[in-house]
Image (spheres, coloured by chain):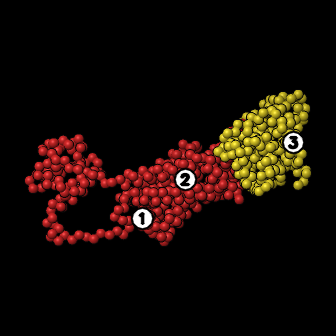
Amino acid sequence: MRIRAITLRILRQFIHDKRTMALMFIAPLLVLSLMSLVFNSNAYKPNIGVSGAAAVFSPALEAQDAAVTSFTTTEQGEAALRDSSIDAFVTVEGNAPSVILEGSNPAATRAAMQVLREAVLQLQPAASVTGLIQPSVSYMYGAEDMTTIDRFGPIMIGVFVFFFVFLIAGVSFLRERTTGTLERLLSTPLKRWEIVLGYVGGFGIFTVVQALLISWFSVHMLGIMMAGSFGYVLLITLLLAITALTLGTLLSAFAGNELQMIQFIPLVIVPQIFLSGLFPLDTLPLWLQRTGLATPIYYGAQALMDIMIRGKGWSSIALDAYVLVGFSLLFMVLNVLALRKHRRM
Amino acid sequence: MNQEQPVISVTRVSRAFGSKTVLKDISLQVNRAETFGLLGPSGSGKTTLVKLLTGIDEVSSGEVQVMGVRMPKLTMLQQIGYMAQSDALYTELSAKENLEFFAALYGLRGGNRTRRIGDVMELVNLQEHLRKRVDQYSGGMKRRLSLAIALLHEPPLLILDEPTVGIDPLLRQSIWKELRSLNNQGTTIVLTTHVMDEAEKCDRLGMIRDGKLLAADTPAGLMQATGSATIEEAFVTYGGGRK
Ligand SMILES: Nc1ncnc2c1ncn2[C@@H]1O[C@H](COP(=O)(O)OP(=O)(O)OP(=O)(O)O)[C@@H](O)[C@H]1O
Ligand SMILES: [Mg+2]
């Protein structure tokens, strides 16, 4: 009854605070859309300069959609490279083709190398005649047309849910303390754990709606790969949100005002994003990889990738889910203990 | 409950924050159905004492009993209506939503809840502003709403920290009349103030200065003991006598 009262109050506060609602619902969709545009955009078309005998490559390069510019002298080509109007310049010295790359943009360099390799292969058909067997390629997970956003999507869903819930729950609990309503609550027969559960209830309901919206938008509007079950995605985001909520309210005890709450973002959120699997972790020093195992977003991201990309079921995500439940319970208990500072009973 | 037993009994209470002792060796009693005023200058320790009575805070030494139960005790909180010095309201919610929330915390439900909300809002003369958001309330309106919330669950003990600050004289008078009628129904009231004419209206008065209780008696008794014509004079005499 008292827990329900707090839950209801939090929902009402959300409904009255249109801006925060917009932040929680619209902002993730906006950023996800932007990411999908950036990562999904059509492959970069390199601009390649040729001169002299290298002109033989032109048809093969153009066949791959690359723009080809012919130069009469090597100097002209090099000048064009210097002012970055072409990405690569091909000449033929003696028998071997020679390539100079502009080189300041890795994406452009990679694209230029790709088309040049293809062009060289096409001009040496002899190699395939000698019986170079084409390997047959198939995919265990993902698909040939899987793009970067398909990989980032599940992680970003987890990151967004965690980030917004952490911040907003932390700030609302902080306000409760600084405006004196927490003290007022503690002068009623409310038990400390009822406050914590009331918060979990209010934000829990809110997050289910948020997670539904983000997941639906990602899968149906942005076309992010979704191999597994929608229900599992909701479950994991909900668990992640409860972890974020309880961590946020816990850390708000160490913040004196809203700005100090925001200062937790580079300390608590950003490192978690880096260790979440967004970037390959294998190259990191071992101690840093281990640190990742202590961050909630890591488990949320692993589980979401298992569900959305690899289409796996409960048995694969169970461990991640249990770890998130464990984090939530731990933070809840710590919250109840932290409230002792305000009222001992 | 035994009529003779005091509702509040404070015995040799001290409260220290770190090395700073804010309340020193305070003993006092509040009887059933009386209005007990705590009078003292800013920073004298009124709020600190009041928080000990409500059980939010704990004594460093000594003992506080409410209705014979040693505080702090969670179950006693249902018996107390507390109005804090700062308005602890959810400003983004309407007055009605605030009242409904606190009513639910005290276990009021259904028709009873609706009836009580109507009653207390009428008492503080805010019935027309029930659906207004609290951030559109004036300072005095917020104060009245805080008072309404403290009265909501009809507690036998009311603890009010500066209840009439920012409330106009006319309304202040009508609120005092209400507090009086609550007294008549058996409600015990403890309130803090630094307004002298308000202090005179209390049945008994405790004078606090620098964390010490200088005296506790009826206003007339205090004036008589010091041979002064007003409470203000009596207060000054007690304060000076201490030096
Ligand atoms: N949590 C705390 N930590 C340290 N000192 C405190 C704390 N709370 C109160 N004090 C100190 O205790 C003293 C008494 O404060 P209190 O709030 O009880 O005064 P008051 O009589 O209610 O004053 P006012 O009339 O201005 O409300 C003040 O000197 C204050 O600085
Ligand atoms: Mg005070």
For the point 21% across and 71% down, the residue is: A133
Chain identity for the colour yellow used in the image:
B
What is the distance, in whole Å, between disc 3 and disc 2 at their CAs?
Answer: 48 Å
Give the camera-side residue of A259 and B113.
B113
Q: Earlier in the sequence, mark 1 or mark 2?
A: 2
Q: Nearer the viewer, mark 1 or mark 2?
A: 1
**For the residue labelled by badge 2, is the local secondary structure a helix, a strand or a loop?**
helix
Q: Callout 3: residue from which chain?
A: B
What is the distance, in whole Å, between disc 1 and disc 2 at their CAs?
Answer: 25 Å
Give the camera-side residue of B121 and B183.
B121
Give the camera-side residue of B132 and A161.
B132
Q: Which mark is residue A165?
A: 2
Q: Nearer the viewer, mark 1 or mark 3?
A: 1
Q: Which mark is residue A309?
A: 1
Q: How packed is label 2: few (under 14 Cα within 10 Å), some, or many (20 or more)? A: many
**Dot 2 amino acid type:** Val
Q: Which mark is residue B180?
A: 3
Respond whether the residues carrying marks 3 and 2 are from the same subunit. no
Depicted B199 relative to depicted A263: above or below: above
**Dot 1 amino acid type:** Ile
Q: Quadrant of ligand 1?
A: top right
**For the residue labelled by badge 3, is the local secondary structure a helix, a strand or a loop?**
helix
Q: Is residue B26 left or right of residue A215?
A: right
Q: Is residue B200 left or right of residue A283?
A: right
User: Which picture quadrant has residue A40?
Assistant: bottom left
Respond whether the residues carrying marks 1 and 2 are from the same subunit. yes
Chain identity for the colour red used in the image:
A
Locate residue B102, reporting x and y percent.
72, 51
